[in-house]
Image (tube, rainbow, N blue to C red):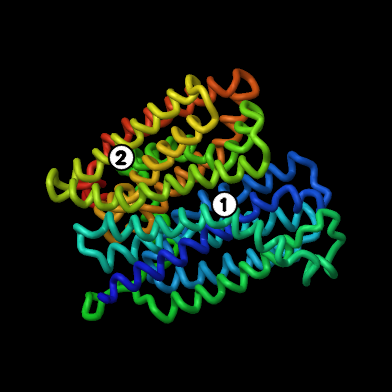
Amino acid sequence: MPQRYTIVAVTAVAALWLYIDRVCLSTLADDVQRDLGLPADRKDLVLGAFFLTYALFQIPMGSLADRFGARRVLALSIVAWSLVTAATGFVNGFVALLAVRLLLGVAEAGAYPAAAGLVKNWARAEERGRFSSVVALGGRVGAVVAPWMTAALAATLAGVGLAAWLAHNPSGVNWRGVFTLYGLCGLAVAGLFWLVVRDRPPGAAPAAAAAPALAVLLRQIAVLARSRNMWAFGGVQFGANIGWAFVVTLLPTYLNEVFHVPLEERGRMQSMVLLIGCCGMILGGVVTDWLRQRLGPRLGRSLPVAVTLGGCAAALFLVPSLPSVWAVVATLGVMAFLVDSHNPSIWSFAQDVGGRNVGAALGWGNMCGNLGAFASPVLVGGIARAAGWDTAFVVCGSVFAAAAVCGLLLDATRPVEAET
């Protein structure tokens, strides 16, 4: 097997654990809330805190990956987020829980920017979409697996270990043991990653000498902020994540309030939507690489983004008129499929235009996207309470449409450095 395939596969495994550690708290949130005695509003704040620091540290961590090498930064990131995940099993109140979630956002922020740098170094230009889709698919698979595996582990570990001696455990769910076990598994993944992955192929030109870190970061931010391409890129990510984040935040609430779906069935429906979305990841990589060869880099990257996000808008506009809950689930599955289909084009675009700033470029887009994810439950939930769920879907569809317009403006023939 060519070495670049092995490196992409191991990076995809790292992305899988990235999402498992990120998503598992939502599965255990009610039990954590009960055992720590948290009010509902503080639980919601804890769930949203991750996205805030994850967004704000995208560019700094991407800059570190550009400066010190993707292998070093991503390996240290895996170690850091694994230790933070394990530490979650030892929290004793709201402040500690909030702190570990904020730290988790910081620790995971460098993962995808660094992974984008690895893909750029190892993949040919015509392979970047497919390689990026494999790495991103690893994360999506982690999101699908996390709810089922977390619930099963919590049941298996009931009455064992940390929950028995660290704190009162009225929920009867050993969430402390789950977090600790996930942290230990993550450390094993970090070791595998460090042993297998290298920054660039043998014989490739070494990276340029590093300038002072602060100077590099300030320069990269200035370069990105002057680029119209990057603002369109950020608009795509912000709008797409406002709509998509509904699936991982408020979909169970919607299913309960509108269709009165029982708890276990809501979980299966949510996982089904995410599973359908995973299928779009590989297809998106193949399509964007094929279009790049047929239509050139500009349309090959921008057209898949615009078409898929336009399709997402149409799907959400359709939801209020659907007659049954399964019709809604299927339509939201189509939306998730289209969102995941556009992701490889986004990664490949950042690799095409980023030059030596590819980590910071992808970090810029991820920052905007996760600010959208942070805003999504507040915006959608507020609209639903004020004007109803149908209005909330129309607003989300409109945001998707605006993101599709931003996608048409992407120009992969204009590198960030040359443009500025």
Residue 194 quadrant: bottom left
Please give the name of the residue rendered at 40% of the width and 37% of the height, measured from the top-left corner: 334
| Residue 193, above or below 419 | below
Residue 110 seen: yes
Residue beneath label 2, please? Answer: 305
State the SS at label 1: helix
| Residue 32, above or below 81 | above
Residue closest to the eye, 322 or 297: 322
Please give the name of the residue rendered at 54% of the width and 21% of the height, measured from the top-left corner: 390
Circle number at residue 147: none
Rounded to the nearest angstrom, the CA distance separating label 1 from label 2 is 26 Å
Amino acid type, mark 2: Val
Task: Tell me where residue 178 appears, x and y as whole percent.
Answer: 68, 64
State the SS at label 2: helix
- Residue 394 relative to residue 89: left or right: left
Task: Tell me where residue 62 appears, x and y as whole percent.
Answer: 42, 59
Residue 357 quadrant: bottom left
| Residue 356, above or below 393 | below
